[in-house]
Amino acid sequence: MLNEVTVTRYVTPLREGGSLPGLVEADDLAPYVMKFTGAGQGRKTLVAEVICGGLARRLGFRVPGLVRIDLDPVIGLGEPDQEVQGLLKSSGGVNLGMEFLSGALGFDPLAYEVDPVEAGRVVWFDALINNVDRSWRNPNMLVWHGDLWLIDHGASMIWHHNWRGAGAAAARPYDAGDHALAAFAPDVAAAAAELAPRLTEDLLAEVTADVPDAWLADEPGFDDPDAVRRAYAGVLLPRAATVHERITLPEPDPDRLPRTPGWLTGTATLNGGTR
Ligand SMILES: Nc1ncnc2c1ncn2[C@@H]1O[C@H](COP(=O)(O)OP(=O)(O)O)[C@@H](O)[C@H]1O
Ligand SMILES: [Mg+2]
């Protein structure tokens, strides 16, 4: 079960992303990035964050720790920004909090080298959860204390928007052509050999148990929250076994391979290009 804290102060919106997460403080005196049940993308975004973030952590990726974060909508009353006020007012109850990585930088493929093993692990994981939101345009990775951290899994597991077609999702391919780490020669075969056997029924039961009942209640076609939890596991378990066979990566392109940036080697040209 995730730890539970309560929001004491809304600090500021984080406007880089689309869902308007907020930086807040909680009653344990820690800062959190908060994602709201009342956001336009809906509560399934939060379910995806809990399941994928929990899986990632248990598979050894660096991801911010998660908490359930309780919000009294009264916190929104003094908020001058109308959009933020609306979000706070419509998100009373349990929301999602993430450990705030203070001072983290957005991942930049020209400034940060990723080895093929790590790149392969990330691409394999994103294929498993069908994450379409880790492209080079929008990497959703941070560099913190010199290490790569994964964030923002809200747009993954698209099959949970149409459970009737979810049975086929396990076999769906994954196009990693636009993936932020595609140019780092990801070794997905090694990642599959290491990670797929670790994705067991027990692990999935543990991860899905962390999703608050309130976010799974009244899902059409399901009797109760536990039945929805089993449906998530029912896609991820078979997908883990074979997804590496269906990952499309671009042919290695020597010109796109990451290199030490020109400002480090002294080869930067006046128009900003590098040799
Ligand atoms: N745990 C975190 N620590 C520090 N900064 C974060 C964290 N999570 C998100 N951010 C910052 O907030 C931005 C938006 O968060 P993200 O989870 O990507 O939300 P969205 O769904 O809106 O894209 C990120 O691009 C990043 O700059
Ligand atoms: Mg994002």
Image: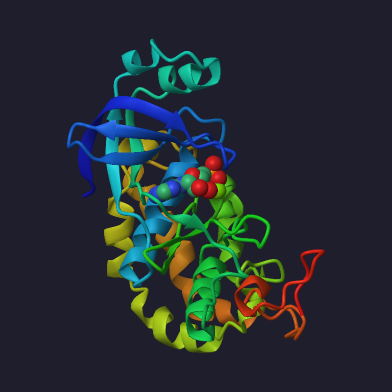
- In this view, which residue lies farthest toward the left? 28
Relative to 166, residue 33 above or below: above
Colouring used for the render: rainbow
- Whether residue 224 is visible, yes or no, is no
Is 13 in front, or is 189?
Answer: 13
- In this view, which residue lies farthest toward the top? 77
Residue 142: x %, y % from top left: 47, 59
Relative to 60, residue 44 above or below: above
Residue 214: x %, y % from top left: 34, 34
Left/right of residue 260 with respect to residue 99 in the rendered view: right
Left/right of residue 29 with respect to residue 211 in the rendered view: left
Left/right of residue 169 with respect to residue 150 in the rendered view: right
The residue lying at 57 percent from left, 57 percent from top is: 166
Relative to 111, residue 42 above or below: above
Corner quadrant of residue 25? top left
Is 41 in front, or is 150?
Answer: 150
Residue 172: x %, y % from top left: 64, 68
Residue 158: x %, y % from top left: 58, 52
Left/right of residue 266 with respect to residue 225 in the rendered view: right
Q: Quadrant of the C terminus?
A: bottom right
> How many marks on residues?
0
- Whether residue 94 is visible, yes or no, is yes
Corner quadrant of residue 270? bottom right
The residue lying at 54 percent from left, 66 percent from top is: 126
- In this view, which residue lies farthest toward the right? 271
Corner quadrant of residue 31? top left
